[in-house]
Image (tube, rainbow, N blue to C red):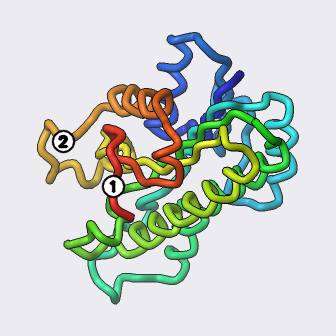
Amino acid sequence: MSIVIAGASGGIGRALFELLNKQGQKKIFCISRQRLRDCDLQVDLSESSQIKLIQEFLSHIQPTEVYCCAGVLHENSYMPEKSLNQIYDEWVYKSLSQNVMTHVHLAQALAPILSKNYDLKWLSLSAKVGSIEDNALGGWYSYRMTKTALNMFIKNLSIEWSRKSSNIIVASVHPGTTDSALSKPFQRNISPEKLYSAEQTAERLITIMQNLTAHQNGKLLNWDGQLLPY
């Protein structure tokens, strides 16, 4: 029994690793694009050419819990778009690559390992802004679109993998606005009680993982485990 944290170099991924390590209940393995001291596999999940390498890694550890924390909101000269004329093809494609295909490739690497009665819980970090029904403000085109795509991927994946094993539960989760590099440029407009530390977010994610039920399979969950509309 082991846990995989993909995207372990980010604020939430790192906090998850440290907290789970302290608990010491299961062996923790980290996947990261960046070179980290505790990284078990350094690989770019956005590259499909790396799927075979990831599969070999996962086949040896047989994970029972997966946290996929990979994603991007802004980078260099690209910030969330406020209007239509700020949408650039290259950034939409980059967002899709980082926010969706990283999760797809990890799942593709894990799929051959899954067998009948395999026990697995999977959480993908998504965002409430990816909810179509909840969107009343507009803007943030690339991030919203790609997180919505991620939610649909998780829905599809939950259906396919439930046919492999009734013991597999897959969900996406909105972690809340966390004090990290991803949210740093936007924290000025967030009230202190709604800005969570990475440690607090990690605690919540672990609680959600431990309490995942079949009712939550294929769903978008809030940081408190409640269902959010797709």
Q: Earlier in the sequence, mark 2 or mark 1?
A: 2
2 and 1 marks in contact (CB < 8 Å): no
- Residue 132 vs residue 91, the one in the foreground: 132
Identify the disc placed on residue 194.
Answer: 2
Mark 1 burial class by Cα count in 10 Å: few <14, some 14-19, many 20+: some
For residue 32, which quarter of the picture?
Answer: top right
Q: Quadrant of the C terminus?
A: bottom left
Secondary structure at numbered mark 1: strand
Label 2 amino acid? Lys
Measured Cα–Cα span from mark 2 to mark 1? 17 Å
- Residue 142 vs residue 88, the one in the foreground: 142
Q: Residue at x 41, y 67 (%)?
A: 143
Label 1 amino acid? Leu
Q: Nearer the viewer, mark 2 or mark 1?
A: 1
Q: Residue at x 50, y 75 (%)?
A: 92
Q: Quadrant of the N terminus?
A: top right
Q: Residue at x 81, y 53 (%)?
A: 51
Q: Residue at x 68, y 27 (%)?
A: 29
For residue 141, which quarter of the picture?
Answer: bottom left
- Image check: 110 left or right of 224? right
Q: Position of residue 189 (x, y in %)?
A: 14, 53
Residue 226 to residue 51: above or below = above
Identify the disc placed on residue 54.
Answer: none
- Residue 174 vs residue 77, the one in the foreground: 174
- Image check: 43 left or right of 155? right
Identify the disc placed on residue 228.
Answer: 1
Residue 32 to residue 137: above or below = above
Q: Position of residue 207 (x, y in %)?
A: 42, 27
Secondary structure at numbered mark 2: helix
